[in-house]
Image (spheres, helix red, strand yellow):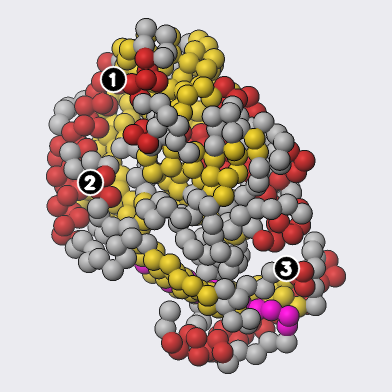
Amino acid sequence: MTDSLHADFSHLDCEADFWSLRVVDERAENYCVRKNVPQPPSMSLDRGAMLTVYAGGGYGYAATSDLSRGGLQAALDRAAAWARTSAPRSLIDSRTLPRPALRGDYASPETNAKPWSRREWYELLAEESRAAGCDSRIVDWEASVETRTAEHAYLTSKGGEVSQRFRFVMPSLSVTAHSNGDTQMRTLNGYRGLAQQGGEAMLERFGFVGSGARVADEALQLLAAPNCPRGVMDTLLLADQMVLQIHESIGHPLELDRILGDERNFAGTSFVTLDMFGSYRYGSDLLNVTFDPTRPEELASYAFDDDGTRAERAYLIRNGILERPLGGAISQMRAGVTGVANARADGWNRPPIDRMANLNIEPGDSTLEEMIAGIEHGVLMSTNSSWSIDDSRNKFQFGCEWGQLIEGGKLTTVVKNPNYRGISANFWRSLKRVGDESTLEVLGTPYCGKGEPSQLIRVGHASPACVFSAVDVFGGDA
């Protein structure tokens, strides 16, 4: 941020054990071409600060969009008042919490590269839109993109100074086909599933050019396809469906504040309990899950979380055994367990809470061809279309856009409306093959919701394709 911000911070006055200033400046642009008609662009700017205070054992915070010295001081005074008021009722004594004094910076790949112009974006989106609207049975189609740049600064009364700059590109393409009373939608890796840090180079990695015709062809194939059959069978989930499986049945259950009960009244609790860490068999020996904020292109990479804790790669599940939760410094103190640097806020006017960041399944040693060849009777599923999971994040039912039967070790009939269900505690133990690097994709979601008041945050997931045995599968007519 600017030198004036540092100068203003140095002149703030507060009688407290510790205080911090977190400033967020984010700018977003959205472009869309729907049914060959360019839609008006939308732009947004969001800038403000959060002041946090530890005083007398209490914890308080206050946000402001007034970044003048007077505005920051007023917010700091409010935060200090809340800290003193909360001290007698606090869950923990803030005097025992870390007081970050780390200094450092971070930047997304291609942060300094010249961004595409509005014209360049509209020309690309229009080309993919024209290719997608290629058949009278295609009744709706859209190509769009969101680009976002952000600067985050974190300063503390103990000398901490962190500066982080981010750039995100999140394209999307969807096609809806209809015929004889049936409607099928096909997307490019789900809605905003192609979400990475960096610049426009990510478009080439995912083959965005040419995707309009390809996705339209798959939507038309689904119209002609039979429903997915019902039965218990091996299921091969490609990376873009594994993203949802990881997110819902590993990520959310391992959030430490949820395990402690903080989300109970809003988004539910977790089947995971504190005594499971270090011994609980979460999955088969093939399941290795990491919290990894160090992969440059992944959506939620960063060097420090929003409480000023340095972010490092760590195993959450190793060889199927649960090792640690997704919990930041405050939750770690409450629970008495080791977590990770994932105290994150979705903006300047929200406090950090325990959130997923980059949550990845480490690749195995099987090629896609080997996984298919090893299945006598099963189904391949790709791209999430629906999800339902109970309020302890255990029993689930997920649907996909695309299915293809596997018979005698070969891909055969395309099927529509493939669905599967299971119980998290058992499902991951049925993991029997994990794809190698050639099957891995780095994806994510910009819209993971949690907290009261609600926070929508960016989450990254990298995963290979995976095979699960004896899965309960059914179609849309079940």
Whether residues under marks 3 and 2 lie with C-beta atoms below 8 angstroms apart, the answer is no
Residue tagged 1: 223
Given the image, on which type of amino acid does mark 2 rest?
Glu
Identify which residue is drawn at 58% across, 56% down: 342
Query: In the rendered image, which quarter is residue 78 located in?
Result: bottom right
| Numbered circle sitting on residue 204 | 2
Residue 308 sits inside the magenta stretch: no
In this picture, which residue range is highlighted in magenta? 16-28
Residues at marks 3 and 2, CA–CA distance in whole angstroms: 45 Å
Q: Mark 3 is on which residue type?
A: Leu
The number of callouts visible is 3
Q: Position of residue 59 (x, y in %)?
A: 73, 71
Q: Which residue is mark 3?
A: 97
The residue drawn where x is 26% and y is 26% is 218
> SS for tag 1?
helix
Q: Secondary structure at mark 2?
A: helix
Q: CA distance from mark 3 to mark 1?
A: 57 Å
Mark 3: few/some/many CA within 10 Å (<14, 14-19, 20+) = some
Element at label 3: loop
